[in-house]
Amino acid sequence: MSIDLYWSDDVVRKFPGLAVAIGNITNVSVEKENNKIKELKESVCKEVLSKYSLDTLKDNPIVRAYRDLYWRIGIDPTKTRPSGEALLRRVLRGNPVPTLLTAVDAYNLASIKTIIPISGFDMARLHPPLNIRFARKDEEFMGIGATKPIKLDERMLVLTDSERVLCIYPHRDSEHTKITEDTKEILIVAYGAQGIGRQQLEDAVQLALKYINTVCGGKIGFIRFFSSVPAGV
């Protein structure tokens, strides 16, 4: 099953050229942990520790692009960081990558390596099509691990399906559509910012799917790209 994604007119006007890439993998076997994800964590952490430092991370062009986006949507990125940067900073401080579920840990590792914010959703819980729009006044969102919903600010960008907000773009996912040990098909979303190119987003999705396949098995399916600027414009 492929999935379509649409942009609201006001997002297109304010953020021309904003884009996302999505992809899926089927027939996965999600576990709490296994030796493959332990080995992958060790490999990725070793690589990024040799490549980045906390002192200079803020000047990285990918980090800069997402921070600039955050300021434009009213979020202070020094307090609420884009997920890719937040995960990478955790590793650079010497802290372990969180152990959640093998599939989740796998796409988090792809986010750490690329610094691109990435979400993963249980496709059985989605109600396509997907939309990217601004949150509505006092719209509610239940984040993963939350005990009660929060009310969203109208400046916030959100990813939704036909029923609910799936993600506050691009740093927190919904409790309702999270991956569990019962998940068999996963949708991966890589979130763009102005200055982040198509290849970077598609590569991030491809890497996330590859890592999930490595630790959970399954069959990699489609990868699609959606820009707020129509083709040919």
Image (cartoon, rainbow, N blue to C red):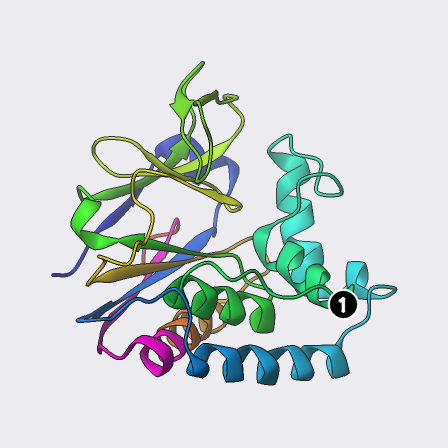
Residue at left 43%, top 83%? 36
Q: Nearer the viewer, residue 208 or 70?
A: 208
Residue 232 in view here? no
Count of numbered badges drawn on the protein: 1
Question: Which residue in the protein does label 1 denote?
Answer: 94
Q: Position of residue 150 (x, y in %)?
A: 48, 22
152 in relation to 207, above or below: above
Circle 1: is it few (<14), some (14-19), or many (20+) Cα within 10 Å?
Answer: few
Rendered position, 147 above or below 84:
above
Which amino acid does the dot numbered 1 rest on?
A: Gly
Q: Quadrant of the rendered structure where residue 217 is?
A: bottom left
**If the image is split into quadrants, where does the N terminus sit?**
bottom left
Is 212 covered by the magenta stretch? Answer: yes
Q: Which segment is the magenta one?
A: 210-228
Quick one: 101 or 77, which is closer to the camera?
A: 101
Residue 98 x %, y % = 56, 60
SS for tag 1? loop
Question: Most extreme residue toward the top, as rendered?
Answer: 138
Q: Is residue 104 visible?
A: yes
Q: Residue at x 22, y 57 (%)?
A: 182
> Of residues 58 and 200, which is closer to you in this image?
58
Left or right: 90, with 138 as reference point = right
Task: Please say whether residue 125 is one of the residues in the magenta stretch.
Answer: no
Image position, residue 58 (x, y; %): 79, 58
The percent position of residue 7, horizontal first and vertical second, equals 34, 41
Q: Is residue 211 left or right of residue 87?
A: left
**Residue drawn at x 70%, y 60% as measured from the top left:** 90
Quadrant holding the C terminus: bottom left
